[in-house]
Image: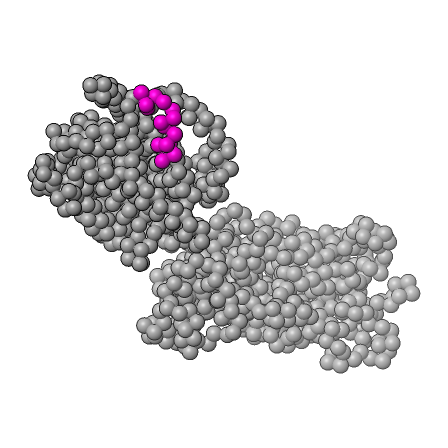
Amino acid sequence: MAMKKDDAARTRLFTRRTALLAGGQLAVFGSLIARMYYLQVVESDRYKVLADDNRISLRLLPPPRGRILDRYGQQIAINQLNYRVVIIPEQTGSLPATLDALSEIVPIQDFDRRRILREVARKRKFLPVTVKENLTWDEVARIAVNTPDLPGVMIDVGSSRYYPDGDDVAHVIGYVAPPSEADLTGDPLLELPDFRIGRNGVERVYDLALRGRAGTSQIEVNALGRPIRELARQPGQPGNDLILTLDIELQNLANQKLAQHESAAAVVMDCLTGEVLVLASVPNFDPNEFNKGITSATWHELLTNERAPLTDKAVAGQYAPGSTFKPVVAMAGLESGMITPDFSVFCPGSMSLGNAKFHCWKKGGHGTMDMVNGIKNSCDVYFYEVAKRIGIDRIADMAHRFGMGQKTGVDLPGERVGLIPTRAWKFAATGIPWQQGENLVAGIGQGYVLATPIQLAMMCARIANGGFAVTPRLTRDLVEGARVENREAVTFPPLGISQANLAVVVRGMRGVVNDPRGTAFRARIMDPTMAMAGKSGTSQVRRITEEERLHGLKKEDQVPWKDRDNALFIAFAPVDNPRYACAVVIEHGGGGSANAAPIARDLLIAAQQRERAKLPLAQRYAATAAAGPAPDTEMH
Amino acid sequence: MQTALFASRHSRTAVEKLRQVNVGLIFLIAVVSSIGFGTLYSAAGGSWDPWASRQMIRFVVGVVLMLGVAVVDQRVWFRIAYGFYFAAFVLLVIVDVAGAIGMGAQRWLDIGGIIQIQPSELMKIALILTLARYFHGLSLEEIGNPLYLLWPAFLVLAPAALVAKQPDLGSAILLVLMGAVIFFLAGVRVWMFLLVGGSGIAAVPIALKFLRGYQRQRLVTFMDPESDPLGAGYHIIQSKIALGSGGVWGKGFLQGTQSHLQFLPERQTDFIFTMLCEEWGFVGGLALIGMYTLILLYGISISLRSRSQFGRLTGMGVVAAFYIYAAINMAMVMGVLPVVGEPLPLVSYGGTSMMSLLIAFGLLMNVYVHRDQFIGRWGSGTEG
């Protein structure tokens, strides 16, 4: 009985405690539900974002870089498909076996093989590793045919910059290269492995416009980062096409002509608009090498070559202008009022100043010279006298008005300023006052005076266009899609010089080429409608000693290259209605009239002929935009 | 022997008993297991292979075992309880010794390479039966005497220590909590729980010292998961993201991004509740908890109806084990408790947990089938 009673008590206790426990259990479930409600309902939005952050990976789609076209729509810089073979390690049965099989189709060097194995070891197994780039069509085809035997091997297409005219445009276009640490701006586009940044030339100046905007692709990835599928794609904006003022065929011609010399530069520009048609510098280099990844041997050679192939001598080469400076001195004299066009000097072959003797280039002298004849014959003594009378500061002022001694502002990097000395400059720079003799030397464009070829071309253009402050430019338009954004033709302010005085100088320059006694008569243009006017210059790079004068000057080819004179020529055409101005500088090229003038002549003839054969720009661009690669322009 | 097991002179036949087995409970178990099959199907990316199909086979085998356990005479269970416990204990010692000889964690006993037994699972069932039998024979007065509690406390703590040493913290916690529930229901005085609980809390710093490196790490990261987002805290963070991003209605079957893109670890075992809630949302989670609650209430009502203290305690022991699994697992994936490795009952992939749970439910049904069975303090008795 006692046991029965105890049983009943035990049962009651059990029931009570079970109820208590069940209540506790339900309470715990309730709080779990509350927790679940908090996570899944209250905080759900936050976690949805976190889940998307987890799974969605944003990939950048690099925009195609804008093309660079010449003034007639010829392609100077394009994007070429770059076929490369990649290997996806996880899809190969055996990586070494696949590599062996692949190497029978495309040779794989030992060091390439080691690099591939290294990359494979480092990367995740589903990420492709590049085996070889820049495959030929033949190699692509052979790999494609053999894909069944090459598990995990794929052909991948990238885009790389290609310059069809390579060397000839190297200095103007520059090149592209992977961004360096210093270039990184935080824009993730720059960190894409295939991305290239403009490194020099217009590629660098207009880099941002050419670059375009990156598109994005939302890719779903798993926890290991393996892409599962594309969720959304926002196409980027391709880079703008850039139309240069350059005429690629004229540029090729200039390079071809200059290449006969070891180191030279030439500029042809439009006197009225400032458009640069030719900007050439030799020796040059192949910018495509940089895109592919230049070898250290090639790079070293480019750097150490004493002809400085990497330097754009057209804008960064500074030369004593020699006699090509004389038109500026003439203008300074005429504008000062101290010299009239009739002002005459007798040239006996030299001029004495104190106990120094200043020689004319013509040993026997020119006899009596006025301004026009002084220019035509390039009489040094005549300009010694003019310079002595007006002094360096008047010459410098006129040179500055013609744009010398300062950057022309052409849209290229690395332009240099040249040098136009003044009294104040010399005293500040050396502490020694200006000497009278230095007036004489400056009067024939020697001594301290330095100019770049593009400055000389601009100076010549300002003479030719009747004294307007034209400045050179290389770009015509930036094109967005099919819309051509035409820049308004710029009008240039007048230099404020007398047309009559200018006419005197032009008459002299016309004589240089067209008068049988002119220094460059042999380089004249026969067709009178295309005739040019010009001025030769031969500048010494080294002082001629008295001894050499006594024994007679050596012939140019007997002197070491480095010691030979620089040959210069400036010209414009057609002389009656000037349109094109040209400057040619040949380093250590001997006489300007003999070596530089023929190149200037050929370029000016070609420029005038081509202009007559060409269509207006807008039509040309529409044609190439529709047809893709530009057809041969000569056909039209 | 055959008759002794299945049909004593006075008792019903096995078939008669089968008719009395609670169909509603079997139905609930089947529904919850089916939720598991569906989730495993999704976890494999929409494939019966490798998890769902095997789980289904185990379920079928498990249900057969469950029914077998249900129809065995309750007194047989009563009689073999201590022997069963002893056998399970010996096996536990054997795996611990084998583990000490071998390397690292050893939870399995491999017999001939064919049958693998996890003694900790056997022990869970053995402990329920043993404690139920022990307290069945104790009067209230005796229960009030702490001296009578030393032995059952040892019966709980010794295997718990062995299991913890394997190391299987989840099972050890289960054994202790389950034991505590049976102690409580048997009528052990509340002040004793307070005393033991209090001293337990005081012993926490000492216990921490004995935890393995990764176990302690789990506790630390549980306290502050953001402290190690890519390491040990990763599981908890990713689980919360998966749960939260599921929202009210979920991302849809087979659409869980966190699970399918493998951000969620162990989605087929410990974190299967997370996956379920990612795809079916708050509503899906609520439905499962609802099912669990129904099973819980069913189990409680079965236990309350039993005439014998043995039956009541056995039933509630099974209910407790089931409930502890569910609550700890869900609390763990929601970031409320540290990750200790408890499966979600009937849903998580894993043969042994499914088997032992179904066998345990077999005991619960056994209690229902024998609800009117009288068992004397020392095992005698007749069917009432």
Count of numbered labels shown in the rendering: 0
- Please give the name of the residue rendered at 65% of the width and 59% of the height, measured from the top-left corner: A455
Left or right placement of residue A574 versus residue A560 in this view: left
Asked if residue B201 can be seen in this view, the reply is yes
Above-or-below relation of B112 to B28: below
Q: Residue A589's image quarter?
A: bottom right
- Please give the name of the residue rendered at 56% of the width and 67% of the height, measured from the top-left corner: A294
- Please give the name of the residue rendered at 65% of the width and 61% of the height, measured from the top-left corner: A316
Above-or-below relation of A283 to A183: below
Q: Quadrant of the C terminus of chain B?
A: top left
Nearest the eye: A636 or A560: A560
Q: Residue A599: x percent and y percent?
A: 60, 72
Left or right placement of residue A32 versus residue A567 in this view: left
Q: Main secondary structure of the magenta part?
A: helix
Q: Residue A434's image quarter?
A: bottom right
Q: Is residue B152 magenta?
A: yes
Q: Residue A93's image quarter?
A: bottom left
Looking at the rendering, the stretch of residues picked out in magenta corresponds to B141-155
Q: Residue B28: x percent and y percent?
A: 17, 36
Q: Tell me the colour scheme of the image.
A: one colour
Left or right placement of residue A145 versus residue A264 in this view: left
Nearest the eye: A550 or A12: A12
Asked if residue A601 can be seen in this view, the reply is no
Residue at far right of view: A355
Nearest the eye: A531 or A610: A610
- Please give the name of the residue rendered at 32% of the width and 28% of the height, measured from the top-left corner: B183
Q: Is residue A631 magenta?
A: no
Q: Residue B185: x percent and y percent?
A: 29, 25
Q: Residue A36: x percent and y percent?
A: 32, 31
